């Protein structure tokens, strides 16, 4: 006999707790103020504007390092979220201590297409190749208009191997 489906609030709470646990593992994400808007299995990174993010006050423009970090953070969290998704749907990973390790960056190439203006920025990553050991990601960032990107990047990541129960 099939198990009845869980109430939607229970599923949402489990997903929100898992995302908060995943994001909470990286202090730099909190420093920048990056959050994630979740719609089902899709994540959008949100970088709220703050004065500390400005690199050139004469333009003013968001610092290139902040832009790069935002794109890389969105990529890594998207990879982690994708790896957790199946387990989340089965009721696992309700506790941050059970999370797998984070992917490690092999290389990350950023294309700065225009200056990031002093306003909120958004980014969405798309996994172009996902294997057991290696993944490729393309990520795009925009501000007011999704079709007018201010930066994009391509990254390659070493995927974490499952932890063995033996020590």
Image: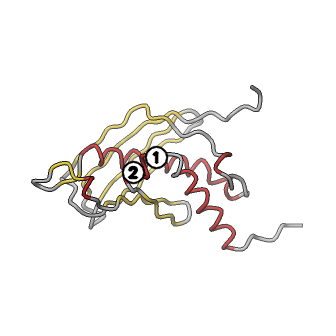
Task: Note whether 89 is above or below 4 in the view shown.
Answer: above
Report whether 164 appears left or right of 157. right
Circles 1 and 2, Cβ within 8 Å, touching? The answer is yes
Q: Quadrant of the N terminus?
A: bottom right
State the residue lying farthest toward the left: 58
Q: Position of residue 92 (x, y in %)?
A: 72, 53
In the image, 19 versus 6, the foreground residue is 19
State the residue lying farthest toward the top: 167
Residue that appears at 51% across and 33% down: 158
Q: Position of residue 76 (x, y in %)?
A: 47, 45
Q: Any mark on residue 95, and which?
A: none
Q: Quadrant of the C terminus?
A: top right
Pointer 2: what residue?
A: 31
Task: Note whether 18 is above or below 127 in the view shown.
Answer: below
Pointer 1: what residue?
A: 27
CA neighbours of label 2 inside 10 A, class few (<14), some (14 to 19), many (20+): few
Report whether 89 appears left or right of 131. right
Report whether 42 appears left or right of 118. right
In the image, 97 versus 39, the foreground residue is 97
Residue that appears at 24% across and 61% down: 148
Element type where label 1 sits in the image: helix
Residue that appears at 56% across and 57% down: 19
Residue that appears at 43% across and 50% down: 29
Q: Position of residue 45 (x, y in %)?
A: 41, 57
- State the count of labels: 2
């Amino acid at each position: 006999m099939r198990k009845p489906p869980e109430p939607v609030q229970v599923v949402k709470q489990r997903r929100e707790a898992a995302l908060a646990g995943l994001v909470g593992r990286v202090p730099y994400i909190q420093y920048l103020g990056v959050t994630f808007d979740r719609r089902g299995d899709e994540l959008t990174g949100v970088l709220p504007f703050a004065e500390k993010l400005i690199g050139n006050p004469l333009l003013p423009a968001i610092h290139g390092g902040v832009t790069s970090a935002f794109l890389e953070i969105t990529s890594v969290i998207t990879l982690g979220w994708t790896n957790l998704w199946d387990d989340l749907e089965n009721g696992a990973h309700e506790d941050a201590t059970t999370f797998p390790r984070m992917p490690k960056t092999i290389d990350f190439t950023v294309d700065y297409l225009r200056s990031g203006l002093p306003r909120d920025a958004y980014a969405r990553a798309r996994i172009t190749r996902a294997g057991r050991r290696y993944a490729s990601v393309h990520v795009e960032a925009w501000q007011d208009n999704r079709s007018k990107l201010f930066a994009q990047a391509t990254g390659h990541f070493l995927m974490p191997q499952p932890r063995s129960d033996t020590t």
